[in-house]
Image: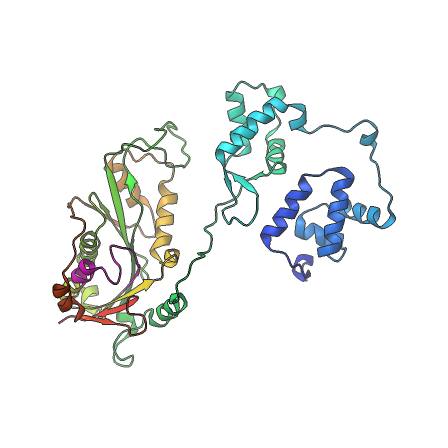
Amino acid sequence: MQSTTETSLLPLSASQIEDLKLASSKMSGADRRAFQAAMTLKYCQGNARQAEGVFGWGRETVQLGLNEHRTGVICQGAQAAYGGDKLWEEKHPEVAQALWELAESYSQQDPTFRTLLSYTRLTAAEALKQLRTQGFQEDQLPSPSTMAEVLNRNGYRLRKVLKAKPLKKIPETDAIFINIKEKDGNPAEDEHSVDNRLVKRISIDCKATVNIGDYSRGGKTRGDSLAADHDMGCKEKYTPFGIVDEDKGSLYLVFGSSYKTSDFIVDSLMGWWESIPEHERSAMTQIQIKLDNGPESSGVRTQFLKRLVDFVDHTCKIVQLLYYPPYHSKYNPIERCWGILEQHWNGAKLETVEIMLEWAKSTTWKGIQPLVNLSKTVYQKGISLSKVAMRTIEARLERNPILPKWDILIRPI
């Protein structure tokens, strides 16, 4: 049987429903019932059961509001004769003010920016703990369940931070995605003469720099919970670079102690190649690389393209570069691996490079632990080829005539 919510013809988005629920939570008594009845008539065809499924309002309360709307008679509860019981924040305004200041320090705006709601990372248990630390007594504090209600009805809700959909597009965005879909896993040679299984599909990218030291990384730990209050002045930093095999699920990580450059990326790619067993390397006919159009590895970065040509000649394999469009890097498969790594070591204090490497080695992607290496090579920034030198390299590049910067094929000589 199909649910009431599923059969409703609501012209409302999820964020609009959240706004209406928040507005209702700010009211009480007859005003709340009148508001819920009006929204039920407008969006749920006057059906109290449907309003309960969509907005989470009590069915009996909504029905009472509908009856009041129909008859014009407002029901008064017994508590009205005695003034009713005050809310916790009304009984304890001083504690409530301390709670609001605490919640604000943990809060952020709706990550989609579609509503005026504020969301806080502050849990009810943590709020009680912080208020006790400030000296408030148990008789002034609510129970954990009531604390959760207090935070919710005042606009502070626990909400997972969502990565908003990219708002910017370039004219080629749709064509780039179509091209990636058509080329994904398909060989550059004649389809009838080359086995698709011989195309190695990998995704590569660098992650944000990791600071080494006694720093808080925003996570939780059951151990020592004290850390430096900011990351300024960090002297030891490492840039992670990752390669994920889309078919096998194997992950290769390199932590570089120098700059993120074209040479660092291709040297790491060479290290990945050398780590592959000989029988797998000999079976490949083509390597298909998905990557972002970042400054160090873009389709116009001369040093990167020069090093890729060298890589192709060294491996004797066809290499195809498939770039994702700007503002859409989250679609690159390696980004999912970074999310798993961040979740795995979230809360850990990476005080030494050895601790960082061990944490990276102990993570898993699709049930497989990654191969982790450390690079101590010092790279020079800003290396580029002259126009004359680039002519030789450009002659080796087979650029897609429609998407020349987003689809590049390089064949060995």
The residue located at (36%, 33%) in the rendering is 216
**Does the magenta segment cover residue 150?**
no
In the image, residue 342 sits, relative to residue 315, either above or below, namely above
Residue placed most toward the observer, 323 or 274: 323
Say if residue 59 shows up in the picture.
no
Horizontal side of 412 relative to 22 (left or right) equals left
Q: Is residue 23 left or right of residue 200?
A: right
Quarter of the image for residue 6 reads bottom right
| Quadrant holding the N terminus | bottom right
The x, y position of residue 270, in whole percent, is: 18, 57
Question: Which one is in front, 72 or 191?
Answer: 72
What residue span does the magenta drawing correspond to? 289-308
Q: Which residue does the image show at 16% across and 44% down from the upper left? A: 376
In reply to whether residue 301 is colored magenta, the answer given is yes
Task: State which quarter of the image contains the C terminus.
Answer: bottom left
Q: Residue at x 41, y 67 (%)?
A: 174
- Compared to residue 406, the image places residue 353 above or below, namely above
Is 370 rendered above or below residue 320?
A: above
